[in-house]
Image: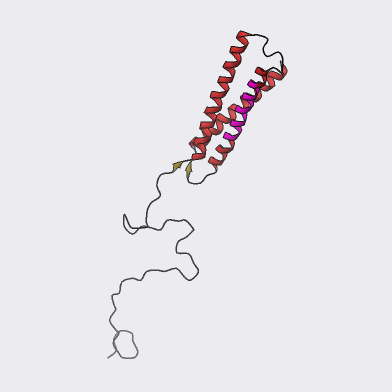
Amino acid sequence: MTQGNDPSGYPRPPQAQYPPQAQYPQYGQPPYPQYGAYPPAQYPGAPGHYAPGPLKHSGLGIISLLLAILSGVGFVATMVVAAVIVGDNPTAFDDEDAPATMILGGCAVLCALVNLLGVGLAIGGLVEKNRKKVFPTIGLIFNGLGILLLVALAILGSIG
C-alpha cells in the first residue's frame, strides 16, 4: 500500500522538470568578482559583453620620445653652430661674457630642460595602466642619455 519509503501512504508527487534557476548575487554583493571585471559572454556578440581589445600606445610615451628627438636635433645644431663659429674665429669662446657663448650655453641648457621634461613624461607613460610601455621606455632611455651627455660636457668644460 505504501509507495517507496513514504510512511504516510500517499504516493510521492511526480518530479517536476523545471529549468535551473539563475544564481543572483546576495543583497550587498557585487554581481561580478571585482570592479572592472568583464562578465562572461553567453554568446559571441552579446550586447554589453566584449573581450578586451589590444592595448594602445601611451600618448605620454610618444611625446617623451618626440621630445628626446627634438632635444637631440637641437643639441647637434648647437654643436654645429659652435664649430662654425670656432672655425671662423678660434678665440670666440675665450670670453665667457661674449654673446655667442651665452646664446650657445643657453641652447644647451634648453636642451637639458627639454630632456628633463621628456623624462617626466616617460615616467608618467610607464605608470599608465592598460597601455603599451614601448615608447615610454625608449623615451626614458634617450632623454636620460641626453641629460648624461650634457652633464658630461659641462664637467669637461669646467675642467678645461
Measuring from the top left, give residue 76's x and y in whole percent.
56, 20
Q: Residue at x 65, y 25 (%)?
A: 151
Q: Is residue 107 magenta?
A: yes
Q: Give the position of the N terminus as an image quadrant.
A: bottom left
Q: Is residue 51 left or right of residue 89?
A: left
Q: State whether residue 90 is above or below residue 15.
A: above
Q: Which residues are magenta?
A: 103-118
Is 104 above or below relative to 44? above
Q: Is residue 14 magenta?
A: no
| Closer to the camera in the image, 139 or 3 | 139
* Residue appearing at x 40%, y 47% in the figure: 53
Q: In the displayed image of the protein, which residue is found farthest to the front?
A: 99
Return the x and y of residue 142 as percentages of the image width and height: 55, 29
Q: Main secondary structure of the magenta part?
A: helix
Residue 136 in the image: x percent, y percent? 52, 36
| Residue 88 vertical placement versus 52 (above, below) | above
Quadrant (top left/top right/bottom left/bottom right) for the C terminus: top right
